[in-house]
């Protein structure tokens, strides 16, 4: 069995990330566009933003994004928001998602964040069970969102 490496994303990981994001939602485009390139450069330069990847067998098999945000409450400690968690379908149930979450949590604790939070699609029950097994609670907050086309 090969070793799993969880690491910060590198600039050259963009195409592999775009491919992974298709498994998150089929509405995501399959190829890198100039808008992807522009957003990727902004993400890499953004303070407190961490795009983590899981690499196995020389390919990216999972990713998540952690945003650590400054805060004026809770002892002026930041909080973390985890988004875009995805593991390649053929690599699921191998501990990859857990390893990514653990690294995000380590970074959040290192930054003295008082919490990390994430949201999951309402109908993605398998993911909900996974997050709960990783220690995330579904009954402490109510999520609300507003989306635009």
Image (spheres, rainbow, N blue to C red):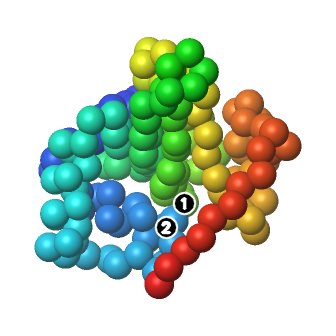
Residue 102 is left or right of residue 129, and the answer is left
Residue 121 is left or right of residue 45, and the answer is right
Q: Residue furthest bottom?
A: 149
Image location of residue 83, percent across then percent down: 50, 50
For image coordinates 70% across by 42% down, the residue present is 131
Q: Which is nearer the N-term, disc 1 or disc 2?
A: 2
Image location of residue 134, percent across then percent down: 70, 33
For image coordinates 16% across by 64% down, the residue present is 37
Image location of residue 27, percent across then percent down: 46, 80
Say which residue label 1 marks: 89
Pointer 2 local density, CA inside 10 Å: few below 14, some 14–19, many at least 20: some
Residue 90 is left or right of residue 8, and the answer is right
Instruction: Name the one closer to the observer, 123 or 4.
Output: 123
Say if residue 37 shows up in the picture.
yes
Res. 115 image quadrant: top right
Instruction: Name the one closer to the observer, 120 or 19.
Output: 120
Q: Are marks 1 and 2 in contact (CB under 8 Å)?
A: yes
Res. 145 image quadrant: bottom right
For image coordinates 78% across by 59% down, the residue present is 125
Q: Residue furthest right?
A: 139
Seen in the picture, residue 36 relative to 104 is either above or below; the reply is below
Pointer 1 local density, CA inside 10 Å: few below 14, some 14–19, many at least 20: few
Residue 51 is left or right of residue 128, and the answer is left
Q: Secondary structure at mark 2?
A: helix
For image coordinates 72% across by 36% down, the residue present is 136
Say which residue label 2 marks: 23
Seen in the picture, residue 57 relative to 125 is either above or below; the reply is above
Image location of residue 28, percent across then percent down: 41, 75
Q: Residue furthest front?
A: 72
Seen in the picture, residue 34 relative to 8 is either above or below; the reply is below
Seen in the picture, residue 33 relative to 24 is either above or below; the reply is below
Say if residue 104 shows up in the picture.
no
């Amino acid at each position: 069995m090969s070793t799993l490496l969880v690491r910060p994303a590198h600039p050259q990981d963009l195409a592999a990330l775009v491919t992974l994001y298709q498994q998150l939602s089929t509405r995501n485009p399959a190829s890198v566009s100039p808008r992807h390139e522009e957003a990727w450069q902004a993400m890499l330069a953004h303070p407190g933003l961490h795009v983590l990847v899981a690499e196995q067998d020389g390919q990216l098999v999972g990713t998540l994004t952690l945003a650590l945000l400054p805060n004026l409450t809770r002892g002026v400690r930041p909080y973390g928001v985890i988004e875009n968690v995805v593991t390649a379908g053929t690599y699921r149930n191998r501990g990859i998602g857990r390893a990514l979450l653990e690294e995000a949590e380590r970074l959040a604790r290192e930054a003295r964040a008082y919490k990390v939070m994430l949201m999951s699609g309402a109908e993605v029950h398998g993911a909900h069970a996974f997050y709960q097994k990783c220690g995330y609670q579904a009954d402490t907050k109510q999520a609300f969102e507003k989306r635009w086309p």
